[in-house]
Image (tube, helix red, strand yellow):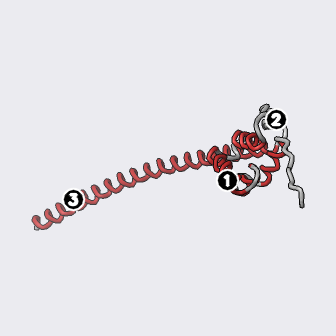
Amino acid sequence: MIGPMTILILIGVILFYIINKISTIRLEEINALEDKRKTLINKYEYMVNQRNDLQNQLIKKEQALTTLRNNETGLKTISAKDLDMSEIDENEKISRYLIQEGKITLEQNENTLKKMNVLQMDYLGACLALGYIDLETAKRTMKINKISIKTKPMN
């Protein structure tokens, strides 16, 4: 009777040891996952805060840009007259002004100069026809550079 009782106690001790070891491993893994979760939450909160800061900066910069665009006393634009280009024709004055203001690129300028004869238009008309500038930009350019609109007499 002692033999089976000893075996039963031995099996119970071994079973207790195995369950204890499994529980210990499980707790270690749960703690490791909890630490990882906390780290990820901290990274997420940092990223959210940084995104919010960047969005706020973007809003402020867009507001500042809008203010500069809408403010008549803001950035002073330089006209062709201010550049003292009296010896240069109006098309050259306008092209330099538009490039300086960043309204067109050098490639667009070259393309416009090439297409002017084909389209039989002046520089601003060719830029408008090619879609490089809008009507508002053309009107503003004409106003700043004091360009008179030349109309052809009707026969």
User: Callout 1: few (<14), some (14-19), or many (20+) C-alpha neighbours within 10 Å?
Assistant: some
Looking at the image, residue 16 sits to the left or right of residue 102; the answer is: left
Q: In the image, which disc is placed on residue 81? A: 2
Pointer 1 or 2: first along the chain: 2
Between disc 1 and disc 3, the foreground one is 1
Q: State which quadrant residue 71 falls in.
A: top right
Q: Which residue is at a point 21% across and 59% down the rendered structure image?
A: 13
Q: Secondary structure at mark 1?
A: helix
Between disc 1 and disc 2, the foreground one is 1
Amino acid type of disc 1?
Lys
Q: Nearer the viewer, residue 122 or 64?
A: 122
Looking at the image, residue 52 sits to the left or right of residue 64; the answer is: left
Q: Which residue is at a point 82% across and 41% down the rendered structure image?
A: 145
Pointer 2 or 3: first along the chain: 3
Amino acid type of disc 3?
Val
| Cα distance between the residues tagged 1 and 2 | 26 Å
Identify the residue position indicated by label 1 in the image: 115
Q: Quadrant of the N terminus?
A: bottom left
Q: Are marks 1 and 3 in contact (CB under 8 Å)?
A: no
Q: State which quadrant residue 12 falls in.
A: bottom left
Label count reads: 3
Q: Are marks 1 and 2 in contact (CB under 8 Å)?
A: no
Q: Secondary structure at mark 3?
A: helix
Amino acid type of disc 2?
Lys
Q: Quadrant of the C terminus?
A: bottom right
Identify the residue position indicated by label 3 in the image: 13
Looking at the image, residue 15 sits to the left or right of residue 52; the answer is: left
